[in-house]
Image (cartoon, rainbow, N blue to C red):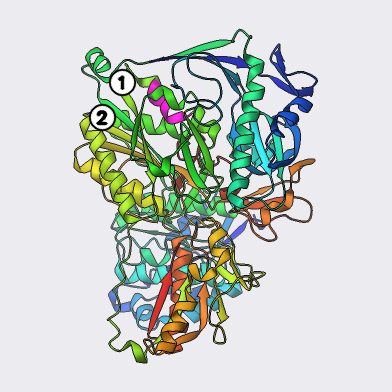
Amino acid sequence: MSDGFKVLYYVNQFFGQIGGEDKAGMKPEFHSEKIGPALGFEQLLKGEGKVVGTIICGDNYFNENKEESLDYILNLVKNEAPDIFVAGPAFNAGRYGVACAEISRAVAEELNIPVVTGMYIENPGLDTCKQVAYVVSTSDNAGGMRKALPAMANITYKLGKGMEIGSPEEEGYIARGMRKTIIVEKRGSLRAVEMLIKRLKGEEFETEMPMPVFDVVQPAPAIKDLSKATIALCTSGGIVPAGNPDRIQSASAQKWGKYDVSKRDALNAPDFYTTHGGYDPVYANEIPDRVAPLDILKELQKEGYIGKVHEFFYTTTGTGTSVSNAVKFGTEIGKELKEAGVDGVILTST
Amino acid sequence: MKLEIGRIYIKDIQLGNETSVKNGVLTVDKTSLIAKLKEDDRIKDVKIDIAKPGDKVRIIPVKDVIEPRVKISGGNNGFPGVTAKPAQCGEGRTHVLYGAAIVTVGDIVGFQEGVIDMWGEGAKWTPFSQTYNLTVDINVVDGIDPHTHEETVRLAGLRAAEFVGQAGKDITPDEVLTYEMGSIFEESNKYPNLPKVLYAEMMITQGLLHDTYIYGVNAQTILPALLHANEELDNAVISGNCVAACDKITTYQHQNNSTILDLYAQHGKEINFMGCIMVPEHTTLAGKMRASDYTRKLVKMLGADAVVVSEEGYGNPDSDLLIICKKCEKEGVKTVLITDECAGRDGMSQPLADTAAEAVAVVSGGNVSHVVTLPPADKVIGNAEAIAVLAGGWEGALLEDGSLQCELNAVIGSTSEIGYHNVTCRLY
């Protein structure tokens, strides 16, 4: 038994059996015994894991002193060095859910310890942690404890034993949002025809890809006086200095680059070329300005039509690049441009 | 229209002094094949090799895969409009060396060529690990521009398939499949109660190394065109593109389009399969609107109740796919889509470049950015280092011990959007 995996448990003042609303202001405490749900939890680990202690914190205290509470709790977790961290379940309790979520995320991201928790699908804490923790789907009140704990324990057991975690449907957790590539028995066309026939017969069918929900970016207000504006050039067309010094990928970019063009009138060949793998590079390589028109921008600067071309040009490869990487690149580049006092950006795609 | 496909089962492949099939063993006369291909004076050098299922062989960079066939009756042998005079495809009898494939290899043209592993982990991800492959590695003469290079390699692959296909001319097939369908009126009279279904096959037709040809016509120049379901199964459509290896439709996959075959299998049972609309994918918004309007019009004109739409490529064609879906659904036509996903290496990103609430029935061919590690091969046909510049590879993707780490992007046919392979994604 002493060789089993170690679980550290987190609960609030209520499930920690300290008290109700009147005790919600209590500071986080560590108890080396198993308290509340932690008690039954160990029995569900098939003798292979043990709960080494329970952290209890008041919901109000956590939510009103987040940073301090998180610091304290993370330190406790670091000291105990569990193999798996378990929080809740929080059901639909808002403050408790947010506490479980914030702690779960911090433990997973900062300490790299796998986390299991449980919540009702509408718990406000869910979005904070579902990508990094296994959040077992529970009912909206504590009446669901008897169903939630075995599911949480089962995932904990598998994590502890290094076993693969199955699908959300199999394991009872809320999908983390990960698109997992798998091999199935039937080829895609057969699945499509079967889906079609079900649809035609009015039978139930299930799409393999729920449509993504897009965020909406508000357009920036128009620049009133271009002749005083600094304009930056940015492209997802993969134009890079010869040799591709930052090794930006030809597809599915993992990074972006920026290059000083303050002393150039154009992005001439052979000093520049494209590393983009999604279009025919012939014409871009002849005249890279065809993709990222620094030449025209510099002419407009000379004419006084625009104030200035920003000294750095930014570039990456758009093809096959995930939206999450694109969002990250955009945020990083946007921040730099903002700090450099750039007023507008010409962003070319291919 | 009636087409008989006579399958001659190929159980082994070897190089020799004649081109023949004996007891299921395909022998290819290497010297004559090389001489035949070098009739094209743009070709400097040809290397022929073989790769069988289970061999610890890696083929890279792969341009196209073609099934060797010979026309026995009806139409013209070869690829009408490309390697042969124009003729009607989809009629008469065609013999197929079933289980064999021609795989073209050679210097990189674009960035979008791929890898085929014949064994182990890599074999799972490509359907062409299961075929007896004749590899044709083509070097072109110096100073040739990329577009001519692509054309040279494309035609060489088709000619090689024709040359090898001749071996099936006088052989009695092991199995004869009959594909027969009358006019849409006849079929509708025959099956008045079955729902009418069309297949809209989107093709990369963006020019500049991204083209598909129908009877030799560059599909970039066409309005969506209606084909009888037999035509594509009988060499009417060929690939001329360097789109990412994972979801390009190789010529082999056109010849054996699994969506057509699976719809055909239900014709007269659950559905009335009326034919294929070949839809060009354009890069401009005007092109996308025109092609999608025209597709919807054909769907309506033919009175279809449902349509299966398959995509080729990803990124901006995702928009074409969803625009077609929206327009068809709006007309009350039930639409099923086949696509793949760009969900990032960790699978956490949204999978498509566009979205539509109407797309309620979607089949996924998997995540193109899923990373696989392929163990070292005993033998590499082509050039293992090409992975550094292929879409889906990167500098350093070839590890020191010869293992290859790459995205499915680089694996031929892995995330097929005509549903040719059995990869998909689940929400985890």
Whether residue B234 appears in this view of the structure is: yes
Q: Position of residue A313 (x, y in %)?
A: 51, 79
- Which chain is home to disc 2? A
Identify the residue at image location x=25%, y=39%. Answer: B296
Residue B278 located left or right of residue B357: right
Quadrant of the image containing the N terminus of chain A: bottom right
**What's under tag 2, amino acid-wise?**
Leu
Q: Decide whether residue A63 is among the magenta residues.
A: no
Quadrant of the image containing the C terminus of chain A: bottom left
* Tag 2 near tag 1, CB within 8 Å: yes
- Residue farthest along the bottom direction in this orientation: A228
Identify the residue at image location x=63%, y=40%. Answer: B153
**What's under tag 1, amino acid-wise?**
Glu
Magenta range: B257-264
In what element is the residue under mark 2? helix
Residue holding disc 1: B270
Whether residue A203 appears in this view of the structure is: no
Of B190 and A350, the residue lying toward us: A350
Residue holding disc 2: A200
